[in-house]
Image (tube, rainbow, N blue to C red):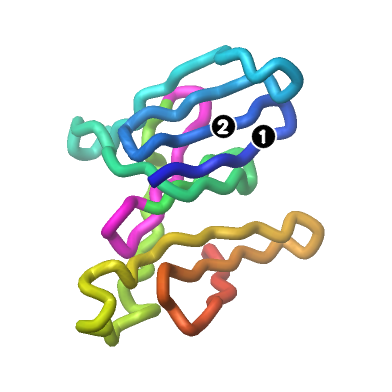
Amino acid sequence: GWGITNDGTSLIMSDGSNKLYFRDPSTFVLTKTLSVQDPTTGKEVDALNELEFVHGEVLANIWFADKVARIDPVTGNVVGWIDLSGLHPRRSPAARGEDVLNGIAYDKDRDRLWVTGKLWPTLFEIELV
């Protein structure tokens, strides 16, 4: 999986690894590569997928997990986790495991966050508290 967002200065991209790539939006030149890690476990956070930039943090869903990492774009440290495991409790056997969290959208004008997944019939508006 992969994702792309921007922080107003750079394009920020994922490629399914534990890396975030920052690129100049005019030239597409790579300006920074950041490894993402969870300081509470000391481990790298792999499978970064869909991205959004919200309130100074990069939000990244973790491929095949019902959670979103809140990432500091300066250090690469996970500063928190958003647990979305209760949103889609009934998995479809016909989906063969592909009905996973896979979509994050942020409405900056109204400060709203939306999530959904592959083969999910519903789009959820969530509030971070």
User: What amino acid is found at the position of numbered circle 2 in the picture?
Assistant: Ile
Give the image location of residue 122, x and y in percent.
51, 82
Give the image location of residue 59, x and y in percent.
49, 47
SS category of the residue bearing label 1: loop
Residue 91 lies left or right of residue 83; in this view the side is left
Q: Reading the chain from its start, which is encountered first: label 1 or label 2?
A: 1
34, 95: nearer the viewer: 95
**Image height of 94 relative to 37, above or below:** below
> Disc 1, disc 2: CB below 8 Å?
yes
| Residue at the image point whose x is 44% and y is 43% from the top | 2
Q: Label 1: which residue?
A: 7
- Hey, which residue is sitting farthest right in the picture? 109
21, 125: nearer the viewer: 21
Q: How many marks?
A: 2
Q: Label 2: which residue?
A: 12
* Residue 17 occupies quadrant: top left
User: What amino acid is found at the position of numbered circle 1 in the picture?
Assistant: Asp
* Residue 102 occupies quadrant: bottom left
Q: Is residue 33 magenta?
A: no
Residue 40 lies left or right of residue 26; in this view the side is left
| Residue at the image point whose x is 52% and y is 33% from the top | 13
**Image height of 34 relative to 39, above or below:** above
Give the image location of residue 55, x and y in percent.
64, 46
SS category of the residue bearing label 2: strand
Residue 21 lies left or right of residue 49; in this view the side is right
Label 2: few (<14), some (14–19) or many (≥20) C-alpha neighbours in 10 Å: many
Q: Is residue 65 magenta?
A: yes
Label 1: few (<14), some (14–19) or many (≥20) C-alpha neighbours in 10 Å: some
The magenta stretch is 62-75
